[in-house]
Amino acid sequence: MKNLNEMTDEELALSYIDGNNRAFDLLLMHNKTKLFSYILFLVRDREVANDVFQETFVKVIMKLQQGKYTDSGKFSAWVMRIAHNVIMDLYRGQKGEKIVEPTEDNDLSNISSNDLLDGNIENCFVNEEVLRDVKKMMNLLPTPQREVVFMRFYQEMSFKEIAELTEVSINTVLGRMRYAVLNLRRMAKAHHIALQLD
């Protein structure tokens, strides 16, 4: 039998279903950072994000115990789909109110992009400034567009994975990305911001 530390998330999920509670601890450890950053990016309120995160993992445990998980794809995508549904329920509960309110302390600066940049010191400063501007402008995008941009560029998900996770067609995802790019370009032009990394 495989050591728990050598198992994939999918194998750990199946092991938890078979009664191994330690497997769930590892699943949580493997997925919590990516999942929490996804939730926080969408709701932009740490307290709400914590609530959504906890509710998501309660649902994950219930679905696992009810045998509603089958090893048919990435476990992380399955968990993110559950989180997405919890967030959508929260939206519906708000009855049209904006769930996303800009906050001064959440400008996406918690998302690191240093690994995307190379070059000399001057280029690094320019690149960091461009990325700061992009993150500020992303906060102004409508939530569906911001979600697609985040999943595509910060979580490196394919458009197909995004479509499956958000339960919309791939054409809808592509449309949201197109409108996000157009909106970002329009905002950049209006504020005289150059959006080119060196």
Image (cartoon, grey):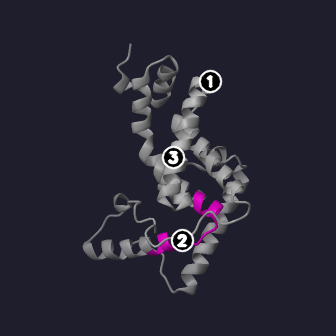
Out of 147 and 160, give the one closest to the viewer. Answer: 147
Is residue 74 at least partly visible in the picture? no
Q: Tag 2: residue type?
A: Pro
Contact between marks 3 and 1 (CB within 8 A): the answer is no
Viewport quadrant of the N terminus: top left
The image shows residue 7, relative to residue 128, as above or below, that is: above
Q: Which mark is residue 22?
A: none
Q: Which residue is disc 1 drawn over?
A: 66
Q: Name the residue beneath numbered marker 2.
A: 102
Secondary structure mostly seen in the magenta stretch:
helix
Q: As drawn, which residue projects farthest toward the left?
A: 121
Determine the image quadrant of residue 7: top left
* Residue 44, horizontal then vertical, whole percent: 52, 62
Kind of residue at badge 3: Phe
Q: Which residue is mark 3?
A: 53
Q: What residue sits 67% from the left and 68% below the top?
A: 179
Residue 68, image x, y percentages? 63, 26
Q: Outermost residue toward the top?
A: 1
Q: Residue at x 68, y 50 (%)?
A: 89
The numbered mark, 2 or 3, whose residue comes first in the sequence reads 3
Observer-nearest of 174 and 104: 104
**SS assignment at label 3:** helix
- With 143 as the anchor, is 192 left or right in this view? left
Distance, label 3 to label 1, CA atoms, is 20 Å
Residue 107 in magenta stretch: no
- Residue 135 within the magenta-colored segment of the rendering: yes
